[in-house]
Image: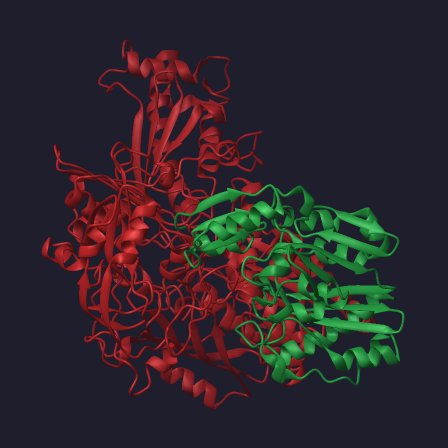
Chain colours: A green, B red
Amino acid sequence: MYETNYHRASSVDEAARLMGDAGEGKYLAGGMTLIATMKQRLAAPSDLIDLRHIGSMKGITVNGRNVTIGAGTSHYDVASSDALKAVCPALCHLASHIGDPHVRHMGTIGGSVANDDPAADYPSAVLALNMTVRTNKREIAADDFFVGMFETALEEGEIIVSFSFEAPDKAAYQKFPNPASRYAMAGVFVAKKGSDVRVAVTGAGSNGVFRHQGMEAALKAAWAPDALAAVTVDAGMMMADIHGNSDYRANLVKVMAKRAVAAAG
Amino acid sequence: MGVEGIGARVARKEDKRFLTGKGRYVDDMKVAGMKYAVFVRSPHAHAKIKSIDVSAAKDMPGVIDVLEGKAMKEDGIGSLICGWMIHSKDGSPMNMGDWRPLAYETVRYVGDAVAIVVADSLGEARDAAEAVVVDYEVLPAVTEAVDALKPGAPQIHANAPGNQIYDWHIGDEGAVDAALASAAHVTEIEIHNNRLSPNPMEPRAALGIYDTAEDHYTCYTTSQNPHVARLVMSAFYNVAPENKLRVIAPDVGGGFGSKIYIYPEEITCLWASKKTGVPVKWTSDRTEAFLTDAHGRDHVSKVKMAFDANHRVTALKVDTTANFGAYMSLFSGAVPTYLYATLLSGQYNLPAIYANVHAVYTNTAPVDAYRGAGRPEATYLLERTMETAARELGISPAELRSINFIRQFPHQTPVIMNYDTGNFQASLDAAMAEADWAGFPARKAEAERRGKKRGIGMSCYIEACGIAPSAAVGSLGAGVGLWESAEVRVNAVGTIEVLTGSHSHGQGHETTFAQLVATRLGVPLDSISIVHGDTDKVQMGMGTYGSRSGAVGMSAIAKALDKVEVKAKKIAAHLLEASESDIVIENGELKVAGTDKSVPWFQVALSAYTAHNLPAGMEPGLKEGAFYDPANFTFPAGCYICEVEVDPDTGKTQLIQFVAADDFGNIINPMIVEGQVHGGIAQGIGQALLEGVQYDASTGQLLTASYMDYAMPRADDLPSYKVSHQTTPCTSNPLGIKGCGEAGAIGSPPAVINAITDAIGNNNLTMPATPAKVWAAMHGH
């Protein structure tokens, strides 16, 4: 790791100010990707501004069906929240399968979503649950947030403060883990709210997380695993690497989607 | 057996320090003035070095020096060698290319070391290493052995035309061809044995300490055989004469073969310590380990197996291409020859075998022995072929094996090995009973109703362990003898130190070796200490690999104990005024048989050292040494059965059960043996389902350079194993031990793959059988 300056911010404003003062600063929101990357000398921020100790960015609020999750909330806290489990157990389930216990206690939802790793789990939930991403500057709709692999609508220095959404009627997340990294090779989050259905796919797309309109339409017509039988997942849109070609990933997307619908009930 | 002696499940003495973080590994060593080394490594798979500019790096903060390979050559440091000579079938010696510890003319794989930076801190050394400017002329690279043999392939070493190291063969080709021509059935198959990264928990490390006053070197190193390291570094690399070089391998956290070899880093740290005047420590990081630890396996073989009308195997013909990587590592020559083709008879009465092996250079990390070393390759080839043949012949795989089992011992195979004992049917029967083989069709039908494809597969393995006798391996090209040494030192108060040339890096020698002594002398385990891993303490030894330390290392201890007992009995007979032949050793006492006259062990020891009252002419003291060179290899064997369920939607294989029925001969500590079997099977399942080193074929870049891409088996990948033992004691060593360290890794891969191919009904599958590959095999993609 190259030398860096560590700052522990105690408020969102302080964090933003520290970032403004830094040469080539990076926010640290758990560091489960960033620290590993820095240890490999693949990233060399001049300053690290740690967001994990900002109290206002932590915690889960459930008000009726309305959920707000602080961006600094750890995966463990999301996974184990009884209030969240009561209205959206799918999100708890997703969080409970990220990484290992160490990662789940250090990593945060905001860090994961801001990093937008194409194989991360959370981005699929943000899209499928149609979350509103609130930052220190504005609110961004889920559909406008993800731009491409490791690329989001966040501007320089912008901090995600929280995520909010209205709990769906039914939802589930199913992923097929990469045998080595255990990141998603294909992860599908399905959510049904009234007549609206959203299907978000992570891990498989060649341009990062995306919604699959074909599956959404099929499930709007009939909410059942078999409704997806006739839907085509275009292998041309899929990633290919040493762990699986695009045909395999396209297959996994469909299989995981069916299983997610089955799990959602 | 007693509670502490041979056969007892004694908890490992060494585990307290390992489990409480008190182990002392090379990286834990700190000496005054010690500095840190980082190696500058080639980012290219094949390139000429046009120039190396270290001037900027030398000016960096904290840098002591930056040293290059040319200066090392000028100082007379030798090139790395393969210590096992193989001759091609035309009689010519193998073409060993030059391997400089620090390359200065050509780099031949990604990770090849070109310079060493020594600095006050690791961070400063890293920073400076990045400031070393190497001007490379990139050359075309080749990573697959089959491709490297093709005309026009990049030429890796000038003295290995066509990249061929040797073209070796064994067996009677004429007899095999005749049998194939007249066979009732011939099974043909192409077998790939995937390349593996060893991944010991502790990465390699080296600490070189040069003492200017004494002109003496000390090397702390992560070695499975510190004496061999000293011998090779002294005799071949000209680091220092043996009396001026102490090699210490303290606690070592796993090796699996990869720490047998002498690597560039320890030689360079020793040389750099003299050049800089400071102790120099290097510890590999995990990426360096993936890049530079010797890999294992990597064979491509074409197989033909002939059967007569009664389903008896009449001949086996094998053509194997073995990838050696960019350089010949220390034992590499032996692995795809005498550790591989000599096991191609398996458990079967096979009248004719012919194997042709092409050893090939590629622009990849060196390949050498990895847990099993050649024997897993032979077993996988043979057991997949037997399974395939059974399916083609329409008979049960158990019956086909049973028909062909060797049942008379000793048995001379057509490929050198002479099996002393075994009972292959016993292990097959035990495994089938444990696995409820007969109940499989019902389980398959039940799985089918759940939409799952269930399969069952077996593997009957045999291996050759001990890697001795010395005269035999010498005649096959080994540069060293493969005996073992021991010294038993009885202290004046009766406690005992056993010095051994074996090296424990996870095997539990401190416990098992002590159990032998406790059994023999009837003294408590706590009064026995095992000393190993230091050339200043133990005079000479050949180290631990090839499942040899029980069969060979403990036999040396037994031989030394024989001598100690003889002398102790003489002293006791003298003290008890009895005849020496009447003295027996029981429960820590030396007794006159059939009487109540006895003298305690400590009294005999004390008498030996006070020397006030010894038999006339006897030297004081009680200390004996022995060298043991066995009469034959040992032949552990067994039967493994694996049952799987494949998810047809995803291709994911779930292991339902795994049964191991092994014949290891006599067993010292069943708990430790089971641990060895468990670990070996985990590695074998890793090879079968998960692990595989992959290089980019055009650039030679390592694609599996971290755990993000190299899949190691985790607990949730593995079932609970059912392990049993069938025992035929080995006849070639006094303890009847065959060895157990590698069996799990040898026997398990074919059992897993045979089960999967049974489940999916497609035999066209290579390891690792990842979900993607299995799915493709099932759905024709």
* Residue found at x 67% / y 64%: A123
A213 vs B224, nearest the viewer: A213
From this viewpoint, is residue B188 visible?
yes
Q: Is residue B565 above or below residue B27?
A: above
Q: Position of residue B291 (x, y in %)?
A: 38, 61
**Horizontal arrangement in the rendering, residue A157 relative to residue B177 (left or right):** right
Percent x, y for residue B302?
45, 81
Task: Give the camera-side residue of B556 and B15.
Answer: B15
Give left or right: position of A249 versus B136.
right
Total residue callouts:
0
Is B430 displayed left or right of B674 in the figure? right
Residue sitting at the far top: B612
In this rendering, is residue A31 above or below B437?
above
Residue B240, visible in the rendered structure: no
In the image: residue B107, left or right of residue B295: left
Residue at 28% over, 66% down: B327
Between B563 and B703, the residue placed more toward the observer is B703
Quadrant (top left, top right, bottom left, bottom right) of the N terminus of chain B = top right
Question: Which quadrant is home to the C terminus of chain B?
Answer: bottom right
Residue B294: x %, y % from top left: 37, 60
Farthest residue to the bottom: give it. Answer: B181
Which quarter of the picture shows residue A124?
bottom right
Please state the horizontal and vertical placement of residue A30, each as a whole percent of the image: 58, 49
